Image: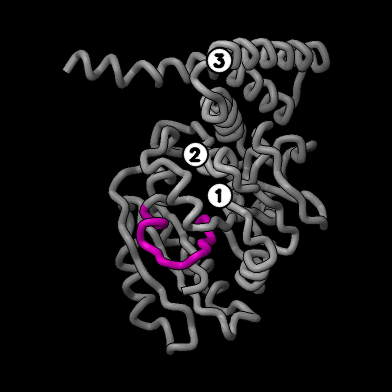
Amino acid sequence: MDFTVVIPTYNGAERIPQVLDRLRSQIDVGTLNWEILIVDNNSTDHTAELVQNIQSDWGNHRTPQLRYAFEPVQGAAFARQRGMQSVQSEWVGFLDDDIIPADNWVAAAYEFCQTHPEAGAFGGQIHGNFEVPPPDNFQRIQSFLAIRERGATAHLYRPEHLILPPSAAWVVKRQVWLTAVPPNPQLRGRTQGSMVQGDDYEPLIFMHKAGHPIWYNPEMHVHHQIPKRRLERDYLISLSRGCGLCVCSLQMLRVEPWQAPLTLLRLTLGSLKRLVMHRLKYGDISQIDLVTECERAFYVSSLISPLYFLENLFKPAFFSKSS
């Protein structure tokens, strides 16, 4: 098997068919031995039944095989781990269930695999497809919604600054993942009641620490389907806070234990400086628009992210002593 497309999904029965339709009609894959795996992350809708029905009418041997796996532990990080454990291909592409790939996405991904065999992972261009127009100046926070438009030239990402591709549409080398990424993720991904992000950056940081570069491939294009509710104030503010809360946890993955105290101090002072500068530039909360308010929420959450990190660090020890 040359290539696998893994689609983690939670209650995605209404979204999956459109993604599969586009994958089924991929071009320039005539000689490629590839497959599609849907990882059902404990859905409560009819996802399993839907996939079974699609499989029964999937097509002949010329189309990629469509498989199904179930992951009972909630969280996209666990769904991705299940995907990696369920495939045998050298390269694995991940697509969220609300991501529509271009008709040559698989071919463009596999070509980059061949020209960059040293890569641990790479992502491409993610464009927004909005149900309603986004707010003014939305480009300042579009990365919170996994939009990536970094130009037409391939280049390396900068994990040391947490500049990385989102898992909404990236490709990883399976053997690198298996050897570099711990099987139990620290950041599990958004779940009911939690918008904390960072679960997709975690494996990339481990790959980078192991010496495998993370690339940007401009030839891979997808469109992120963004419904109206994801552009409403409450959702965007919660999302911005979730992006900020994971900052310290991600940075601590990069450093050795003896570097932790200094890293915590540096992160706290840096976040405080950014928050003060933002306040001086834009004024108090009553004077700012939605995008600026989202930035403010991100900076505040970044400032308190060391507390979030320490709480989660000591919580397991506390419960183990109490049990």
Contact (CB < 8 A) between labels 2 and 3?
A: no
Q: Which residues make up the magenta segment?
A: 82-96
Q: Amino acid at mark 2?
A: Asp
Q: Residue 197 magenta-drawn?
A: no
Query: Label 3: which residue?
Result: 304
Q: Please say if 100 is above or below 270.
A: below
Q: Residue at x 69, y 26 (%)?
A: 295
Query: Label 1: which residue?
Result: 167
Numbered disc 2: secondary structure: loop
Q: Pinpoint residue 4: horizontal percent, then vertical percent.
A: 48, 67
Q: Bin the neighbour count of mark 3 within 10 Å (Cα to Cα): few under 14, some 14-19, many 20 and up.
A: some
Q: Amino acid at mark 3?
A: Ile
Q: Please say if 295 is above or below 159.
A: above
Q: Is residue 237 visible?
A: no
* Figure quadrant of the C terminus: top left
Contact (CB < 8 A) between labels 1 and 2?
A: yes
The CA span between labels 1 and 2 is 9 Å
How many labels were placed on the picture? 3
Whichever of labels 2 and 3 marks the residue nearer the N terminus, that label is 2
